[in-house]
Image (tube, grey):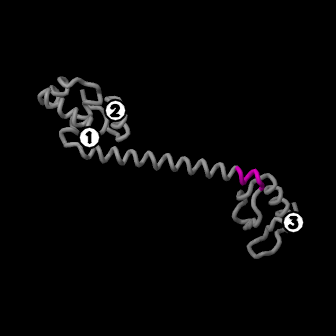
């Protein structure tokens, strides 16, 4: 690889010293573009070796995919938060007890409510949170950071 063919220049546009030039050429051949100290002030005008470009493309695609998944997860949590905020304060109070798997009678005793009232609240929670099962409701609560109620 010839020095002039890859376009290495110093800050002032002058050729680098022979030892520096050889070291930088060797590094480029090893695919280490971008690993030089700032003091070298190197500008590479030619693209990195092909294998490095493909690795960069794969890394970029992986990062884009991770960001897509992160954004999708954030949208889901925002939607769950909106559903949770639609619950009344009493339903929000009952929810931690429901996700522990307690019976309506046990929750009623703990919160000093009638069993029928807890049953209504449980039904409203399931409807407003759009949970098809208790397991799904528990997963939603976990994503929202809601922890189980005290015994």
Q: Nearer the viewer, mark 3 or mark 1?
A: 1
Residue 95 magenta-highlighted = no
Distance between the Cα atoms at labels 3 and 1? 73 Å
Residue annotated with mark 3: 18
Q: Which of the two residues, 126 or 78, is positioned nearer the viewer here?
A: 126
Q: Position of residue 85 (x, y in %)?
A: 26, 46
Residue matched to label 2: 138
Name the residue nearer the viewer: 66 or 44. 66
Residue 54, disc: none
> Which callout, 2 or 3, points at the residue further toward the start of the chain?
3
From the viewer's perspective, is 62 left or right of 45?
Answer: left
- Residue drawn at (75%, 65%), measured in percent from left and top? 44
Residue extent of the magenta highlight: 49-54
> Gap between marks 2 and 3, in whole Å?
67 Å
Residue 19 in the image: x percent, y percent? 85, 62
Q: Residue 11: x percent and y percent?
A: 74, 73
Mark 1 and mark 2: span between their CA atoms? 14 Å
| Disc on the earlier residue, 3 or 1 | 3
Count of labels shown? 3
Q: Are marks 2 and 3 in contact (CB under 8 Å)?
A: no
Toward which corner of the image does residue 142 lie, by quadrant? top left
Label 1: how many Cα within 10 Å (few below 14, some 14–19, many 20+): few
The residue indicated by pointer 1 is 128
The answer to whether residue 51 is magenta is: yes
Local secondary structure at mark 3: helix
Q: Is residue 78 left or right of residue 120?
A: right
Quadrant of residue 89 within the rendered picture? top left
Q: Residue at x 81, y 54 (%)?
A: 29
Q: Quadrant of the N terminus?
A: bottom right
Residues at circles 3 and 1 in contact by the CB criterion of under 8 Å: no
**Which SS class for mark 1?**
helix
| Above or below, comparing residue 132 to residue 49 in the picture | above
């Amino acid at each position: 690889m010839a020095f002039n063919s890859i376009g290495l220049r110093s800050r002032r546009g002058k050729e680098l010293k022979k030892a520096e030039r050889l070291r930088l050429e060797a590094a480029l051949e090893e695919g280490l573009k971008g690993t030089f100290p700032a003091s070298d002030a190197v500008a590479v005008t030619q693209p990195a070796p092909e294998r490095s470009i493909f690795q960069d493309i794969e890394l970029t695609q992986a990062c884009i995919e991770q960001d897509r998944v992160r954004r999708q997860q954030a949208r889901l949590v925002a939607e769950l938060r909106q559903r949770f905020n639609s619950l009344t304060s009493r339903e929000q109070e009952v929810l931690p007890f429901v996700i522990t798997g307690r019976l309506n009678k046990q929750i009623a005793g703990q919160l000093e409510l009638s069993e029928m009232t807890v049953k209504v609240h449980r039904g409203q929670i399931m409807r407003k949170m759009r949970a098809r099962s208790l397991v799904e409701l528990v997963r939603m609560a976990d994503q929202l950071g809601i922890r189980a109620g005290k015994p």
